[in-house]
Amino acid sequence: MLSFIPKVLAQNSGYDPQETLLKLQTEYTESGQLIGVDLSTGEPMVAGEAGVWDNYSVKKQLLHSCTVIASNILLVDEIMRAGMSSLRAWDRVRRHSGRPGLGGSGELGDAQAFCGGRQRLPTEEVGWAA
């Protein structure tokens, strides 16, 4: 039960928190409706009759934020997996070449081996073919 909220509200409004909670619980058991604290009198009030409603826009924003946060967490997970797989690939290339870092079997070394062992033609680098 979220009794700490009306307790803090009553205390901050200058009313006895224990007495206010007792009144709220009694009113709730008698009426069965949602009960709040009238901060001007310290007495229980039926929230719907007093025009107190949960703010729809806040709940809508909360649901939207939850989906955005979950999507970002999944994206970070995918990025971490991609990073780990590329690290493993570079590690395999380094072990294959026999030397740590760049180097290995040719002028391009590990970078050439990582790209499938195929050297690019100069025309491929600029994007046009002869």
Image: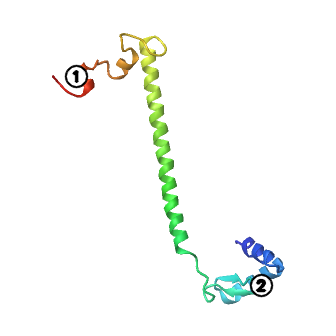
- x and y percent of residue 36 in the render? 69, 82
For marks 1 and 2 on the same chain, the one whose residue lies earlier in the sequence: 2
Q: Looking at the rendering, in which quadrant would you find the N terminus?
A: bottom right
- x and y percent of residue 74 in the render? 48, 47
Label 2: how many residues lie within 10 Å, few (<14), some (14-19) or many (20+)? Answer: many
Q: Give the quarter of the image for residue 112.
A: top left
Q: Secondary structure at mark 1?
A: helix
Eyeballing the image, is 83 above or below 52? above
Which residue bears the numbered disc 1? 123
Please name the residue shown 45% across and 17% down the image: 94
Q: Looking at the rendering, in which quadrant would you find the C terminus?
A: top left
Q: Amino acid at mark 2?
A: Gly
Which residue bears the numbered disc 2? 42
| Residue 110 is at least partly visible in this image | yes
Q: CA distance from mark 1 to mark 2?
A: 83 Å
Please name the residue shown 52% across and 60% down the image: 65
Eyeballing the image, is 23 above or below 90? below
Please name the residue shown 37% across and 10% down the image: 105
Give the label, 1 or 2, closer to the camera.
Answer: 1
Please name the residue shown 54% across and 64% down the image: 62
Eyeballing the image, is 68 above or below 114? below
| Relative to 9, 75 lies left or right | left
Frontmost residue, 125 versus 3: 125
Q: Check contact, mark 1 vs mark 2: CB within 8 A.
A: no
Label 1: how many residues lie within 10 Å, few (<14), some (14-19) or many (20+)? Answer: few
Q: Amino acid at mark 1?
A: Thr
- x and y percent of residue 18 in the render? 83, 78
| Residue 121 is at least partly visible in this image | no
